[in-house]
Amino acid sequence: MKKNSTVANTDLMQNITSLAKRRGFIFAGSDIYGGLANSWDYGPLGVELKNNIKQEWWRRFVQQRADVVGIDAALLMNPKVWEASGHLASFTDPLVECKTCHARLREDQLIDRTCLNCKGKDFTPTRQFNMMLKTYLGPSEESANTVYFRPETAQAMFVNFKNILDTNRPKLPFGIAQQGKAFRNEITPGNFVFRMREFEQMEIEYFVKEREWEKYFEHWLGEMKQWLKDLGVSEKKLHYVDIPDGERAHYSKRTVDIEYEYPFGQKELYGLAYRGDFDLKNHMQASGQDLRYTDTETQEKFLPHVIEPTWGVDRSVLVAMLEAYHEEDAPTAEEGESAKRVVMKFPAWLAPVKVAILPLSKKEELSKVAKPIFETLSKQFVCEYDETQSIGKRYRRQDEIGTPLCITVDFETLQDNAVTIRDRDTMKQERILVKDLAGEATKRLHV
Ligand code: ATP
């Protein structure tokens, strides 16, 4: 069997991008107008995949934990937030322009100070380029009305810290979580959804007593490892990089970048940082509000320290797709079909469609049985109903979108009230009574 490990790295990115477009996972943004550089739109399957990731994360880290609460804050915040957090002054990348081809590049990404575009070696002096996206509120474009799209979701958790203390009265350690869009005017976006200017994050600010930070840092590292395992990511492609002294932010005593071997190189997937009390301290000073926590036993007032695990949603989608992609020799290839079968082997919880209901023909006798099956099962699982094309082509399509179970309704069904259930990975088909379908699907999908 040919596995994705044998698919050349450059081909793999190409295969994923073209499958994403062909099957409706991810389209180029503003496509009919020639696109908008490096913007991407999630299609019908992509939005299911992305929502599965976001919903599982929310269930796991917010709803199923007594010590974490969620928020959903505004994208636009008072500019004073970004002044206090340091983003206005220093959320910058070093920008240079190639004097030969005028490409704008990140200086820290140059290899041997050579232009990635034309191999030129002459650059303008480095200038710090602020990555925050600016816009204006109100009917005039005056600097007084300037606001910024948030470059991260994290600051909203610090800004709402006092609200959460006042309303929830949580005891340390506790976390505030958020999912949502973030915007960065990246100098060099690219590699599909790896680096975009508009993307989504899932972040937790987990507040602890200072003396306990190491214990909870380890706890979140463990949670992130387990998450990656459940996402179907092979351990050998992951690297937990401890950022050495001198390269970390000055307030952080430990930062781990979780890197993944993408086809275009080993780069960041997620991050975990111990941020001390840097953020709360700055916001307390800048806002003039008392953000201290009161220990109910000792009545001591102090600023908690924080552990920040952060996940990129789009990079999660990309990695899930890269890991799921398999090419195998097809046991049976119909006319006009290639001899290889492409299968997205998503873990069942992640698959955008869980069950496909495929009547063998469009004849009414079959749809009379198949449609009620769809109606029943789709109350529990995301299902697809497809009666077009040959059954072989329909299986191919379902394999390519990673549907774990296909149910075929045929003419025998009319006699025996049974259907064929086909497993995506083994391709094994079994006959099963219609009345047992919901139970069987639940068992097989582990839901
Ligand atoms: P990088 O070094 O790749 O620029 P970063 O260290 O700036 O990333 P963080 O500020 O730690 O990233 O952001 C948290 C997470 O958000 C990252 O781990 C990543 O998953 C995601 N992320 C950051 N920038 C982008 C982007 N431009 N497009 C898509 N996802 C991103």
Image (cartoon, rainbow, N blue to C red):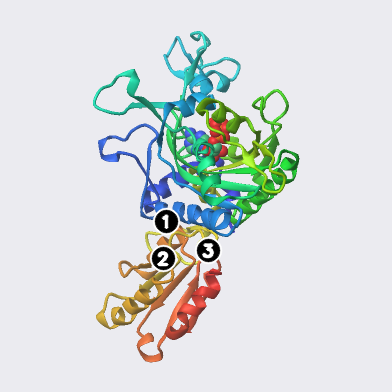
As drawn, the label of residue 48 is 1
Which residue is depicted at the point 65% across and 45% down? Answer: 237
User: Could you tell me which secondary element the residue under label 2 belongs to?
Assistant: loop
Question: Vertically, is 387 above or below 338?
Answer: below
Label 2 sits on residue = 382
- Asked whether 218 or 65 is in front, the reply is 65
Earlier along the polypeptide chain: callout 1 or callout 3? 1
C-alpha distance separating marks 2 and 3: 11 Å
Vertical order, 351 against 275 (above or below): below
Say if residue 15 shows up in the picture: no
Query: Mark 2 is on which residue type?
Result: Val
Q: Earlier in the sequence, mark 2 or mark 3?
A: 3
- Characterize the local packing of mark 1: few (<14), some (14-19) or many (20 or more) Cα atoms within 10 angstroms: some
- Residue 64 in the image: x percent, y percent? 57, 60
From the top left corner, tell me how far across and down residue 223 is, in percent. 65, 51
Circle 2 crowding by C-alpha within 10 Å: few under 14, some 14–19, many from 20:
some
Q: Are marks 1 and 3 in contact (CB under 8 Å)?
A: no
- Residue 206 visible from this viewpoint: yes
In the rendered view, would you say 308 is above or below 56? above
Determine which residue is flagged by label 3. 348
Closer to the camera in the image, 91 or 292: 292
Going from N to C along the chain, the mark reached first, 1 or 2, is 1
**Real-space Cα separation, disc 1 to disc 2, in angstroms:** 9 Å
